[in-house]
Amino acid sequence: MPVHNAEIAETLNELADLLEIEGENPYKIRAYRNAARSIENYTENIASLIQAGRTLPHLPGVGESIGNKIDEIVKTGHLEKLAHLEQKLSGHLAELVAIPGLGPKRVKILHEKLGINNLEDLSRALESKAIREIPGFGEKTEAHIQHELERRQQSRPRLKLAFAEQIATSLLDYIHTIEGIKNAIIAGSFRRRLETVGDLDILITCKTGSNAMKEVILYEDVEETVSQGETRSTVRLRSGLQVDIRVVPDASYGAALLYFTGSKSHNIVIRTMAVQKGLKINEYGVFKDDTQVAGKTEESVYAQVDLPYIEPELRENRGEIEAAQKNQLPKLIQIADIVGDLHVHTKASDGSYTLEEMAMAAQRRGYQYIAITEHTQQTRIAHGLDEKRLTERLKRIDRLNEKQSGFLILKSAEVDILEDGTLDLPNRILKELDLTVCSVHSNFNLSLKKQTERIVRAMDNPYFNILGHPTGRLIGEREPYAVDLKQIMDAASERGCYLELNAQPDRLDLRDIDCKAAKDFGIKVAISSDAHKISDFNNMRYGVDQARRGWLEASDALNTRPWETLQRVLQRI
């Protein structure tokens, strides 16, 4: 049974949560969380390496002890230490930790003070208004927990794109090994590269007489076969992800791919346009009366309604059809357009590799430059740099740049925006930087007015360049803080500032619609990996996916430019 990297990471994070509730050594807890991050973002499947008898790669935070636990998870499907803790602490406390607004420390208090062990206990405590009586909670916190619990109960479970991709890639690799398979592709929201995925739609074409459908449902990750037929089956995987598999004839492949890729609203418009031409479009093809006139390719279907091919990421009925009619579709940015990364951390703050190691990894990717953006002093938990440490860092970067050609390490910092809108370092040090990424890392609960004013005030500083992860959200974990992005974009446009599209799969911040708004404002976007380790450079592709959904072209991104050009673009003084 395949074990995905995200599942290993989830197990280690649950262990860290329960250890924190139990009051374990903070360094040990942090070690498990660091290991979980390393594994979740590692590109190769860890389980496949172990099962092949290969040595685990060197991963930050993964020593012999944690390596043995990973081995146990892969080979047995569970972790004895976690099971022991669950039994010792009773209930489902890790499930409570996942609710935004709680976390291990608060869960421990609720467990000890009110005997809350699971979601049902939490609901009863909220109903009786007992939580507000605990010191440190109060009515506002109680209301927030109530809101997040209701949101969790009402929302259909969706997986983050990066996790869904691990599962989908393994399944697709298996399908391609089946005899008789000609084509296999994942459609739906996955193909449109939405930030979360609710289910998978897989289309298959195969040779006559193939037993493809029977073979597909034998995949070892299938937990339940919901339905089974010759041309359509539905299964549920261990992750809870539902997969609909359809076998379609070659002549209908393009029409089926268009239909099942969606979005529904995009398809409705296309079908309406077809009716106006006396045609009918469905998943089987394009028909004039009873005769099929197109459907083998998506291009042939679009051509029947006088449209050029529309990229899957744009198919949301947000103006793409009108743009196609006017021959004004954007030429969407591609990963190959990215020539540098403007948000990178090293061991000097909360990263896992040295400056030299991160620089060499970036060069191997073909980048022309990276910006080293260590946290500043306010972010103590991330070992933020004060003025003295940052000055030493800049000297070290200068020495490295003197030794190399064709690649540049940019002097930068991820500067905290303080509650009053001032920046976390004085201008005398900020002016020595090539650029700044300025971010909110605290006081997320300010009102819309105060949070917006805070960021706009920060932009008044002439050394402010890029607003990092502009809404502070963590997908499925933390809602965006209240902020008026239109006002932020107005201010950025007036002052010559820019916004970041943070490509971490947990963030993808900006949202796609906000990327489109930035483009309409004429504001360039920095697509950045926010890399804390070498494997995090791979996050860039998720940022590019999001940028494509936001209609961005290469010219709309800052880091598609060589440094000589970018330097002029960033100059404010």
Image (spheres, helix red, strand yellow):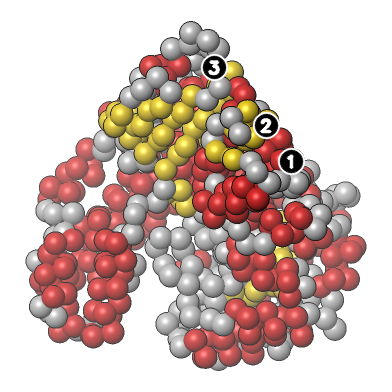
- Residue 500 lies left or right of residue 570; in this view the side is left
Query: Residue at the spot x=72%, y=60% of the render?
Result: 322
Residue 323: percent from the left, percent from the top?
74, 59
Q: Is residue 280 left or right of residue 48?
A: right
Above or below: residue 227 compared with residue 438: above
* CA neighbours of label 2 inside 10 A, class few (<14), some (14 to 19), many (20+): many
Res. 342 in view? no
Please name the amino acid that badge 2 sits on.
Answer: Ala
Report how far apart the C-alphas of labels 1 and 3 lie in the structure. Answer: 26 Å
How busy is the neighbourhood of tag 1: few (under 14 within 10 Å), some, or many (20 plus)?
few
Q: In the picture, residue 384 is in which quadrant?
A: bottom right
Q: Do the residues labelled 1 and 2 touch (CB within 8 Å)?
A: yes
Residue to which mark 2 is pinned: 294
Q: Is mark 3 on a helix, strand or loop?
A: strand
Q: Which residue is drawn at 71% across and 35% down?
A: 300
First-in-chain label (1 vs 2) = 2
Amino acid type, label 3:
Cys
Residue shown at 90%/62% (left/top)?
A: 564
Mark 3: few, some, or many residues within 10 Å (few <14, many ≥20)?
A: many
- Residue that label 3 marks: 206
* Marks 1 and 3 in Cβ contact (< 8 Å): no
Q: Residue 433 occupies which quadrant of the picture? A: bottom right
Q: Position of residue 474 (x, y in %)?
A: 46, 63
What is the spatial separation of the Cα atoms under label 1 and label 2, in whole angstroms?
9 Å
Type of amino acid at the residue the image marks with label 1: Ala
Where does residue 122 sit, x and y in percent of width and height?
16, 67
Q: Nearer the viewer, residue 566 or 20?
A: 566
Report the residue marked by disc 1.
Answer: 303
Residue 122 higher or lower than 160, as above or below = below
